[in-house]
Image: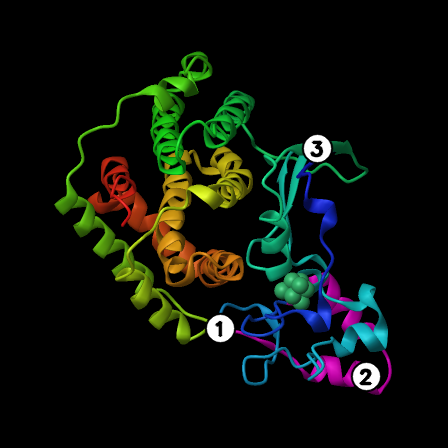
Amino acid sequence: MINTFPSYYQKFKCMADKCPDTCCAGWEVVVDPESLERYKALKGVYADKINRLITVDEDGDCIFISKEKRCPFLLESGLCEMHIKLGEESLCRTCRQFPRHKTYFGARVETGISLSCPEAARIITESPDPITFESEEIHAEILPTAIDPSNYFTLLEARKTAINILQSRDFSIEKRIIAFLEFSQAVQTCLRKKEFEKAHKINGNDFLNAACREHSQKRAERALGRYFSDFKSLEMLDTAWLSELEKAENAQIQSCTEYEWEFEHMMIYFVFRYFMTAVFDGDLLTKSKLAAVSFIIIRRLQAENVSDKQTRIRAMQKYSKEVEHSAQNMEYLRTAMKKSRFYSVENIVNVLSLKEE
Ligand code: SF4
């Protein structure tokens, strides 16, 4: 099997008790069936404790019973009690893997680290050098999939072009995101009509070099208002997130020229993580819209103290934790982006064209 990963991937090491925002707080930890079997087979006092702390939630998933929104094994020191007592191999799949994510495409797998982990967010935005990717052969079972090869290879080529567009530093980050969105729309049309040859011929530079369209300030402001109202209605892990969104809604965005490479890396993160998953549902455009709207929201979340790198990284990490890691939130946003005219490419481009202070 071929494993592809961003070159920063191997730098990741969990900060454990030094982490400013442990992943063991706030989230429900789902125990996978394999780990459940292992826990049931354990013997001794500690085995009793583990099995006593497992319950079934309303979705039918086995989870650890959290205490004040903290994993019951999370010690005051920030360390994991199960890890200390039984070693890393005793952890359930969620805990062993996080923040690593994997997506399988037949004989290929793509691996990354999630922006929702503070250490991963720091690594992703550490260096201004353009993000590159590496591939290696690994031994893993290849599971049968129903992926259409024409779709897959068209998307693979399109993703390379999308990454080139987003890394074209002769253009502002807003212009690059607009070009990326319009390019995705063109590819989506070809995918829908099964015009794979035509999709391969779409030139990313045409979108970068296209003249900026006239935009309507009023429509942009209306659309932006709708985005914030949608984000404020999402399920929240931390109640403070609502007031952060309220502040961001009224924030005046400022120039981000000096650090726009951080946004470039963030956009590449979203593209690497989601673009190819269009092979499963045929919906590329919604994934690209979600990345563009994430930029719009995160930029405003950073506005309060934009010159401070910690503030900028925290805004990305917090956004990812609150939005990207809730299946319910992602489903809500995907539906809104598919159905609501406020999320048309034209309206998102309008918002991206709003001028900074
Ligand atoms: S959020 Fe990241 S750094 Fe922090 S404890 Fe979890 S995996 Fe480790």
Residue behind mark 3: 134
Q: How is the image coloured?
A: rainbow
What label does residue 81 carry, if any? none
| Quadrant field for ligand 1 | bottom right
Give the Cα distance between marks 1 and 2: 26 Å
Residue 356 percent coordinates (x, y): 28, 47
Mark 1 crowdedness (10 Å alpha carbons): few <14, some 14-19, many ≥20: few
When the figure is inspected, residue 97 is found, relative to residue 187, above or below; the finding is below
- What residue is disc 2 on? 46
Which residue is depicted at the point 84% across and 73% down?
86
In the image, residue 234 lies in the stretch drawn in magenta = no
Is 276 placed left or right of 7 in the picture?
left
Q: Does residue 115 appear in this view?
A: yes
Q: CA distance from mark 3 to mark 1?
A: 40 Å
Q: Amino acid at mark 2?
A: Tyr
Q: Residue at x 55, y 58 (%)?
A: 116
Picture layout, residue 46 above or below residue 234: below
Q: The magenta stretch spans which residues?
A: 31-57
Task: Assess disc 3: are there few (<14), some (14-19) or many (≥20) residues with their C-alpha within 10 Å of its C-alpha.
Answer: few
Asked if 321 appears above or below 102 in the picture, the reply is below
Work out whether residue 89 or residue 61 is closer to the camera in this orientation and state it.
89
The residue type indicated by label 1 comes to Glu
Question: What is the crowding at mark 2: few (fewer than 14 residues within 10 Å), some, or many (at least 20)?
Answer: some
Q: Would you name the residue on which mark 1 appears?
A: 58
Magenta stretch prevailing secondary structure: helix
- For marks 3 and 1, give the one nearer the viewer: 3
Of the pair 150 and 134, the residue shown nearer to us: 134
